[in-house]
Image: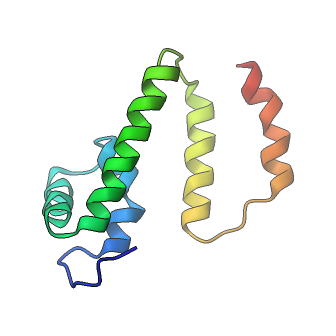
Amino acid sequence: MSCGEPHETDCSEVLDHLYEFLDHEMPDSDCSKFEVHFEECSPCLEKYGLEQAVKKLVKRCCGHDDVPADLRSKVMGRIDLIRSGQAVPEQDVVAELPSAATE
């Protein structure tokens, strides 16, 4: 997704790190770059607004349960693998589901 205009911070970088921005998990200097980008780029601003709304809905509906640290770590590890372009074997994901569901 891109508006087709050049930006100091590329649309792909913004979209790749959107959840880090939403979760306040990035340095203030990067947050500032993203805020400037959203002012300039309507498609990215729209995506940000949509993801922010989904995050609020999930928090409202499911935000009362604490996520076990090891489950969060496994999920974040999978996300990192996917972002780096590595394949995640489906059987590994399925094999871990019962243990995650019982925690």
Quadrant (top left/top right/bottom left/bottom right) for the C terminus: top right
Which residue: 85% across, 41% down? Answer: 95
Please give left or right for residue 82 compared with residue 54 in the image: right
Asked if 17 appears above or below 40 in the picture, the reply is above
Residue at left offset 16%, top offset 50%: 28
In the drawing, does residue 46 fall left or right of residue 34? Answer: right
The answer to which image quadrant residue 23 occupies is top left
Look at 83% across and 43% down and name the residue there. Answer: 94
Q: Position of residue 49 (x, y in %)?
A: 31, 49
Q: Choose top left, top right, bottom left or bottom right for residue 22.
A: top left
Q: Quadrant of the N terminus?
A: bottom left
Where is residue 50 shown, x and y percent of the image? 38, 48
Image quarter for residue 65? top right
**Vertical relation: 80 (above or below) 71:** below
For the rendered model, the colour scheme is rainbow
In the shown orientation, is residue 9 left or right of residue 103?
A: left
49 and 71: which is toward the camera = 49
Identity of the residue drawn at 61% across and 71% down: 85
Q: Considering depth in this image, is 76 or 4 the residue closer to the camera?
A: 4
Q: Position of residue 62 (x, y in %)?
A: 52, 22
- Disc count in the image? 0
* 56 in relation to 17, above or below: above
47 vs 36, nearest the viewer? 47
Residue farthest toward the top in the current orientation of the protein? 64
